[in-house]
Amino acid sequence: MCNSSGEEPTTNSILQILGKKGLKLIDSKFQLFDEHEIAVFLSPKFKSLKMFSENDKARIHQNIELKLMQIELEENSEPSTILPKEKDIPKNVSGSRPFSEWEDAENDSEHSENVPRYKKELEEYKHKYFEFDVKEDNVLTFWKNHTFNFPYLSMLAKQIFAIPASSASSERSFSTAGRVVEERRSCLSGSTVDAILFLNNHFNNLKK
């Protein structure tokens, strides 16, 4: 077997071809969505997002901010205080501290008060160190224990981690339902079928 140039393919060239085809297959079968990226960020051990580029990090943080803002708006009857636009900020106000517009945000109490709560929460989580073992600790337990410190992020974690990782469980349920509702049981009501499926699933969990 020869390649396009008429040379015998080497082991490295074959591996490169197989690698490219493998990556193409993975990309077609496993698509990453915003929820996957947010789930990585919500895992304390990987919140720095080191596996992403700087542009991807900025995009992921922006998506998280939008979701947190939606949660805060839903939680509060009045919209949270939003930072004023740059053109609305006075450059030099009489009586203000000299060079105050150049001070760090952390040291400017007036600026800090105008920062929405979800942004403060997000920044605190990004820069805080957590003792978390990926193999032993449960990420759901982590967010349950940090509900008080990060209420909005905890709510986002519940929304994201409640999404099934795959459709296997629902497909198993449909398969079981197909065996329950057969030709001789076509008159079963929906509530009866639901009860049978519930008992079947509960019984299988007990056996484990």
Image (cartoon, rainbow, N blue to C red):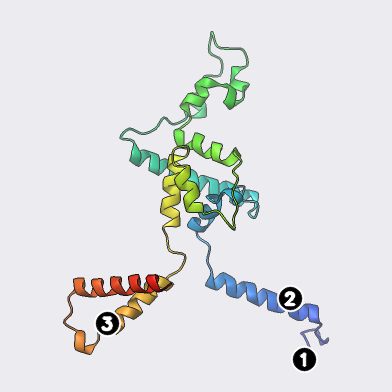
Neighbour class for label 3 at 10 Å: few (<14), some, many (≥20)? some
Numbered mark located on residue 41 in the image: none
Q: Which residue is mark 1?
A: 1
Left or right for 180, reference 79: left
Q: Residue at x 52, y 28 (%)?
A: 86
Which label sits on residue 180?
3
Label 2 to label 1, Cα distance in Å?
16 Å
Horizontal arrangement in the rendering, residue 205 relative to residue 195 (left or right): right
Locate the C terminus and report the quarter of the image it occupies: bottom left
Residue 127: x, y in percent?
60, 38
- Which badge, 2 or 1, comes first in the chain's sequence? 1
Q: Amino acid at mark 2?
A: Gln
Query: Could you give the CA–CA distance between mark 1 and mark 3, rounded to whole angstroms?
Result: 54 Å
Where is mark 2, residue-wise?
Answer: 16
SS for callout 3: helix
Whole-angstrom CA distance, mark 3 to mark 2, is: 49 Å
Residue 68: horizontal and vertical position, in percent?
Answer: 44, 43
User: 10 Å neighbourhood of mark 1: few (<14), some, or many (≥20)?
Assistant: few
Identify the amino acid type marked 3.
Val
Amino acid type shown at disc 1:
Met
Up the image or down, 175 lies above or below 130; here it is: below
Q: Nearer the viewer, residue 137 or 91?
A: 137
